[in-house]
Amino acid sequence: MVDSKTSPGISVRNLYKIFGKNPEQYVDMVKEGMTKTELNEQYGHVLGLKDINIEMPAGGIQVVMGLSGSGKSTLIRHINRLIDPTAGEVIVGDADVCKMSAGQLREFRRHETAMVFQKFALLPHRTVLDNAVYGLEVQGVSRAEQIERAQRWIDRVGLTGFERSYPNQLSGGMQQRVGLARALTNDAPILLMDEAFSALDPLIRMDMQSVLLDLQKEIRKTVVFITHDLDEALRLGDKIAILRDGEIVQQGTGQDIVLNPADDYISNFVKEVNRGRVILVETIMKPLSGDPEGMGIVTGTTLEEAAKTMTDANTAMAHVTDAGGKPVGSLDIHDVIAAMVTPVAHEEAIAAE
Amino acid sequence: MEWLYEFPSMNGASLRALKKAIDEGFRSFTRAYGEYFELFFEPLKHFLIASEDFMTETPWPVILIIIAFIAWLASRDLRIVIGSVVTLLLIGYFDMWEDTMKTISMIFVCTVLAIFIGIPIGIIMSRSDRVQAVVNPILDIMQTMPSFVYLIPVVMLLGIGKVPGLIAVVIYAIPPIIRLTNLGIRLVDKDVLEAADAFGSSNWQRLKNVQMPLALPTIMAGINQTIMMALAMVVVASMIGVQGLGQPVLRAITNQYFTLGVFNGLAIVGIAIIFDRTSQAFGKRLQKHQEVIHG
């Protein structure tokens, strides 16, 4: 019973959100370049989001990263329109969420999206099982089917045996598993995760990230994941967008962002990142000169894994192969380690190429 | 300087004319529509009579068992059940059984009526700040206006008897249930409501699945308050012909029968305690899911 619907991509186009009494009045002024501070000081309105354009990949994980106040939670709430935009479009499949009527929107939320919240937002008076079936109950699915479908996900997120517990009887990590089970039981093609793991302690967070990645291999949903943690963003995101003060500062793959930070703000984030886990072998390989040497390493391998494989095999040279096994470049352990530890030298190397 | 020492009030003649005009206006309104009002409240009268007949005509041991059973269902606490039974036995032993049954029946009908009217009003109030701004001052008036004052128009419209008494009691006792329904719903966690919305709940599903269950403990506190206030009105209501424990108290006041007054007064206290402990225990049981076991 794995997801029968194909997950649609989401495109957010020219999205603006202004908070205040008369937001429409100021959109044009913002479009013409009024800054957030001006808008706030002169007109008492808060600029939440400014000209957001993101193409979110179908069946992939799109991470939106930013610090608190950057507008990331506002952005994710536009996808299921828990917040109405001031201007712009959110296209899911071929429908514009912003133009839906109240009835259409309710159907859209019931069948197309499911959401996981930072503070779990479980129904405290319901058991784990009754929380998990909530989406199906709202849809009007029969009780027997509700239970059958919910049980599958309760088992899958590791809550077997806790079906009759109340949320308050569970730890934070367990509660968020309930939140995840509730969202997955809905079997919607789009999964919205608003800082879903931010309230958990680091080990549990890693654990939950693994649960999500494992599940994603099988369910292939379009996931929108909000976080303030770059490591989490890099670990989960097929694509990452970085938000600051309601604007997108950079978007791309994790590698793009680590290797070519768009400005100082992002460089500051990136400094602390474990590069070995982000950069892939094909990024630093040299063109093949002569016959491929040493062992083969497939493209898509991270530097950390490559270094480990090469060290284990006690070899200094290797060649990179594509998925079909055809050699495409050569790799020196020296370069691998240099790229992992010295960003400056590496940036120069890239500049030199 | 005379005006400084005597308040410059409206002159006596126009004041009299004003009062007379209002009184006569209301009187002719009563004459014209009193009948319709009586007709409108007819079903209520039947409900009251049926409930009173049931309480007074059923053999007392059956009533005792029913009350003990309800107390058990609501509280699951043997002490409360035993306390209720002993109180009722003492009341019966001192020959106040019938009056007590009439009072309990009256309180029961009042509470049911207050719930059916009060909870919907509270829900509407919680959904709109404007409605809240209008209803709140009305509730303030209902609670602070001396009850004798609004007995007058009620009696003018409906005469003396059970129904006007019931209406007077409900007017006095309904504000807490309205206020606390409103408050309970407004205090529901915004995050949980947002989650309900995110899964596509309709307004009704939101109310039924999230707002009402989470507000229920607060609403129960309102119901408890309403019952207590209704009991406090029993004596006042007896002035316009409501039967029950209020009547002997009233007789005791006018004739200075000290013991009669104390006995019936204590009986009112007794059933107040039964109602209070039982409904509070029920309210507490509703919050059981909020106990934190660990974490």
Image (spheres, coloured by chain):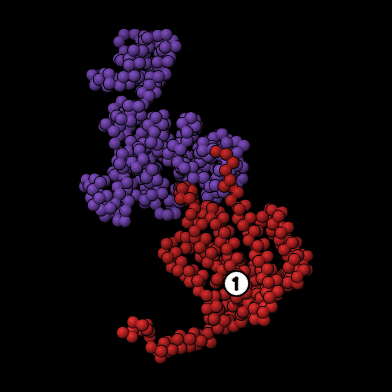
Chain colours: A purple, B red
Q: Is residue A303 above or below residue B34?
A: above
Picture coordinates of residue B153, whole percent (x, y): 53, 81
Q: Which x, y percent locates residue A131?
A: 55, 45
Q: Name the residue under label 1.
A: B233
Residue at coordinates 49% horizontally, 53% vertically from top-left?
B188
SS at circle 1? loop
Quadrant placement of the N terminus of chain A: top right
Which of the pair A292/A85 is nearer the observer?
A85
Where is residue A341, by image quadrant? top left
- In the image, what residue type sits under mark 1? Met
> On screen, A232 above or below B28?
above
Q: Tell me where residue A269 sits by quadrant.
A: top left
Spot the residue most to the bottom.
B13
Direction from residue A71 to residue A131 in the image, left or right: right
Eyeballing the image, is B2 above or below A239?
Answer: below
Q: Percent position (x, y) of residue B107? A: 64, 69
Looking at the image, the residue that sits furthest to the left is A32
Q: Which one is nearer the viewer's eye here, B52 or A148?
A: B52
**Would residue B205 appear left or right of B16 to someone viewing this image?**
right
Other residues around mark 1 within 10 Å, as few (<14) / some (14–19) / many (≥20):
many
* Quarter of the rendering containing residue A225: top left
Residue found at x 46% / y 38%: A199
The picture places residue A110, in percent across and down from the top left corner, at 48, 47
**Who's the residue at 38% across and 36% down the image?**
A228
- So how many labels did they put on this image? 1
Which corner quadrant holds the C terminus of chain A? Answer: top left
